[in-house]
Image: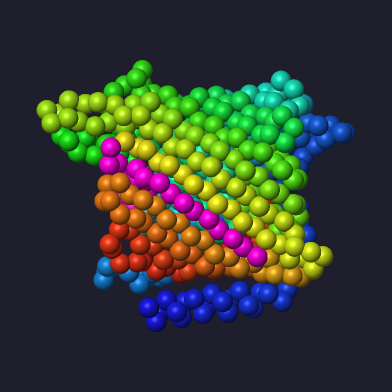
């Protein structure tokens, strides 16, 4: 615990050293125009997030301090004309000393397509698209942008089927999205993956459900799922050009949205009776949420707040590690942007809290986080420091300190 305290202090020192310099005014990415009015263009974005993480609750032969590349991403999208757009997103996640390969070509090589879709606009407010997409249902955080989190990272359980029915929070499917005034919507019909996090697990007689519908029951009965998200923008309207939801606007908008969403996967999970006969169980995840982000005055201060209630039904007593469980979840976070000039370095402390009921153990899981961001050039260059404590059932809580450096071009 003393070592964790020293790491926390070191992180605060690093942040304080940077707090006297910087400029938050910067527009990211690079846009190449192919015609005079800019309606035909290519935009390129790249970003990286780098972690130093300390935990004192590890086995004796495991290092308490670990360094990793949390995310390395490259995204480009092209507006061919006012009707057509194509998006490509490549990257890797959580590259560390345990999963690197000797020359970058081994089984652990992680570079892959995160997104690849094409989109057609049938009018200025409504679009249809197809491909490997991120137009997720359930909640705002299910389609969170990794460019502009307020907390160090996303609330993990909001990516509710990551690795279960999708490839890293993306499905291959067809989506429609658009808006009627300040009412926004997106809906999709998607393929479920067969090779998921439980590809080597089969149901046991009278045991818990396994997320293996497509693999064990076939693509006809368990191969498709439907999801959607709906929100109403009471104040400033957000953009729905891309699916990536902003984590904090740093006081540049006055936003208050309420939303509701769902994901339904018929026969997505499988159970076995006492004789070993298999039976499908529908997976259904429902959520309601609210997001508020606004300046608090003329001094540059701002508040960001978010809350979500989510009901997770993965089937009978489903649980996978300490991440996925049938049960309910309540999560929220709030952050305060300290007064200051917009063209100077800014500081934003925050707190977050999650509590989940877990049917399989008839108990709760809880996670508390407290941290802060220092913005040198807005989200384009920042440092984040967070202490979190995670407790699952009657296990002792696990405390972790993480320092993140991020660059976004």
Furthest-top residue in this view: 220
Q: How is the image coloured?
A: rainbow
Can the viewer see residue 84?
A: no
Frontmost residue, 88 versus 136: 136
Q: Look at the image and give the residue range highlighted in magenta.
A: 316-336
In the figure, is residue 332 to the left or right of 202? right
Q: Height in image: 174 above or below 55?
A: above
What residue do we see at 35% from left, 72% from top? Answer: 56
The number of numbered discs placed on residues in the rendered structure image is 0
Frontmost residue, 49 versus 127: 127
Residue 318 locus on image (x, y percent): 30, 41
Predominant SS of the magenta segment: strand
Residue 369 locus on image (x, y percent): 49, 64
In the figure, is residue 256 to the left or right of 171? right
In the figure, is residue 235 to the left or right of 388? right
Quadrant of res 285:
top left
What residue do we see at 31% from left, 21% from top? Answer: 218
What residue do we see at 47% from left, 38% from top? Answer: 286
What residue do we see at 52% from left, 48% from top? Answer: 308
Q: Height in image: 409 above or below 261?
A: below
Q: Give the quarter of the figure containing the N terminus.
A: bottom left
């Amino acid at each position: 615990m003393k070592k964790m305290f020293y790491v926390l202090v070191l992180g605060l020192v690093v942040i304080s050293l940077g707090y006297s310099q910087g400029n938050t005014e910067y527009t990211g990415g690079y846009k190449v125009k192919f015609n005079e009015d800019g309606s035909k263009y290519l935009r390129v974005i790249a970003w990286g997030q780098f972690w130093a993480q300390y935990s004192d609750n590890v086995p004796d032969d495991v290092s308490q301090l670990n360094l990793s590349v949390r995310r390395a991403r490259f995204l480009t999208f092209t507006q061919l004309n006012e009707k057509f757009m194509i998006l490509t997103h490549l990257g890797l996640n959580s590259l560390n000393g345990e999963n690197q390969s000797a020359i970058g070509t081994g089984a652990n090589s992680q570079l892959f397509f995160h997104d690849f879709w094409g989109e057609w606009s049938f009018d200025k407010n409504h679009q249809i698209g197809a491909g490997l997409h991120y137009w997720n249902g359930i909640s705002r955080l299910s389609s969170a942008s990794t460019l502009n989190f307020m907390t160090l990272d996303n609330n993990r359980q909001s990516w509710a089927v990551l690795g279960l029915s999708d490839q890293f929070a993306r499905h291959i499917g067809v989506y429609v999205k658009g808006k009627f005034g300040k009412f926004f919507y997106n809906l999709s019909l998607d393929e479920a993956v067969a090779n998921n996090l439980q590809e080597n697990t089969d149901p046991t007689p009278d045991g818990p459900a396994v997320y293996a519908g497509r693999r064990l029951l076939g693509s006809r009965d368990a191969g498709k799922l439907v999801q959607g998200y709906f929100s109403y923008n009471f104040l400033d309207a957000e953009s729905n050009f891309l699916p990536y939801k902003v984590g904090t606007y740093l006081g540049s908008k006055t936003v208050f949205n309420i939303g509701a969403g769902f994901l339904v996967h018929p026969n997505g999970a499988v159970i076995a009776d006492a004789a070993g006969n298999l039976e499908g169980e529908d997976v259904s995840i429902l959520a309601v949420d609210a997001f508020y982000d606004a300046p608090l005055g003329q001094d540059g201060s701002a508040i960001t707040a978010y809350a979500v209630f989510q009901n997770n039904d993965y089937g009978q007593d489903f649980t996978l590690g300490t991440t996925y469980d049938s049960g309910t979840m309540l999560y929220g976070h709030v952050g305060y942007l300290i007064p200051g000039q917009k063209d100077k370095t800014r500081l934003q402390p925050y707190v977050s809290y999650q509590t989940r009921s877990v049917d399989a153990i008839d108990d709760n899981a809880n996670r508390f986080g407290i941290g802060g961001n220092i913005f040198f050039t807005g989200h384009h260059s920042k440092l984040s420091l967070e202490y979190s404590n995670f407790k699952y059932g009657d296990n002792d809580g696990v405390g972790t300190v993480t320092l993140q450096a991020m660059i976004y071009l």
